[in-house]
Amino acid sequence: MKVFLDTFDLVNLLEKEEPGAVEKLDGVLQELKATLVVCPRHLEELAAPLTAGAVGSSTMATLNKLESLPLTFANEVKIPILELAEAIRAFRLGQEVEPVDPFVARLDAAVPLVGQSPTERFLNYPLAEIAFDLWQNSPDVLRSHPEHAGKLRGAVQQWRATAKAAGDRSDFVAAVCELALQNARFGLRLEGVDLKGLGKWLWDSPARSPGISLWFRVRNHLVRNRHHQIRDSDVADLSWMWLLPYVDVATLDRRMKDYVRRAMTEKDVLLCPEVHGSLHNVLESLNIEDGLNGAPNNSLERAAKTPPLSS
């Protein structure tokens, strides 16, 4: 079982929650044989004091606290590459897709979009050491990139101006073509692929590319909501959509949680986890007995019966 916390909740857990919150979550995860999913984008936020020039001891302590929990790692940005590569293989052969597995055992293996980590030969490589080495040798990995939010704002303005948010099949096909071309520079092989035909095939069954399908539908709702002003954090929030179909329980902020709810009420129901608005709600959901009345936890039973795609 995999549990995902958005960056706000993860930082609150490690730095601002009441004493004992980490230990409580650890006990629940251990009892359920569950893991907490951590991504490079989480590390970007947790290591922000390093990139701002602060003393690194507090960051190292925070990462050591995080590493006390049972963890698994993923790079959500790589999921479209994995899904498209498998979809292209199956589409060419006239087969159905095999589920992709975006998870790795260590954070350094989750960082590269292409190839293996240069540190994969290290037998023991703690999170704090990974963060320190990235800070020293590849600081761009840990830095925030506000220019990405600027690009998203420009794209959303263009989509709204041209009514390119119908959310229909042709809109989805265009998005798949754009994603494929973007990821070609990361090794995605497109030679001889009918991208429009591939997009139509994926549209017919969202389970063939669950991360891309959920991302597209949530993005569509965001674009259509003209009152939604793009924040810098929306870049990360949208990228979480690629990961959500591969976890069991997750937290999102109120706006993104509402977009996911809307996406899940559409005709094509997507595989998606139980989404909560806070870590407190997640802990209530994950407890084997409900902390308020001792009732069995039905949400946990549902998660057990419907494992994520990577299981």
Image: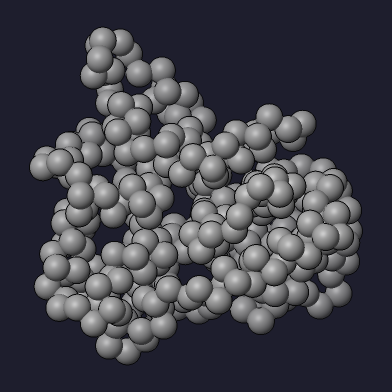
Q: Position of residue 141 (x, y in %)?
A: 41, 78
Residue at 79% across / 57% down in the picture? Answer: 160
182 or 232: which is nearer to us?
232
**Above or below — where is 256 with respect to 115?**
above
Q: Identify the coloring.
A: one colour
Residue at 20% across / 49% down in the picture? Answer: 16
Whether residue 58 appears in this view of the structure is yes
239 or 12: which is nearer to us?
12
Q: Position of residue 81 (x, y in %)?
A: 63, 66
Q: Is residue 22 left or right of residue 192?
A: left
Among the 4 quarters of the image, the one containing residue 142: bottom left
Among the 4 quarters of the image, the one containing residue 280: top left
Residue at 25% across / 15% down in the picture? Answer: 292
151 or 272: which is nearer to us?
151
- In this rendering, the count of numbered labels is 0
Q: Position of residue 263 (x, y in %)?
A: 67, 38
Residue at 24% across / 47% down in the picture? Answer: 13
**Above or below — where is 87 with respect to 169?**
below
| Position of the N terminus by quadrant | top left
Q: Is residue 293 left or right of residue 145?
A: left
Residue that extends furthest to the front in the rendered view of this protein: 227
Residue that extends furthest to the bottom in the rendered view of this protein: 137
Whether residue 125 appears in this view of the structure is no
Q: Position of residue 271 (x, y in %)?
A: 60, 37
263 or 127: which is nearer to us?
263
**Above or below — where is 147 with respect to 4?**
below
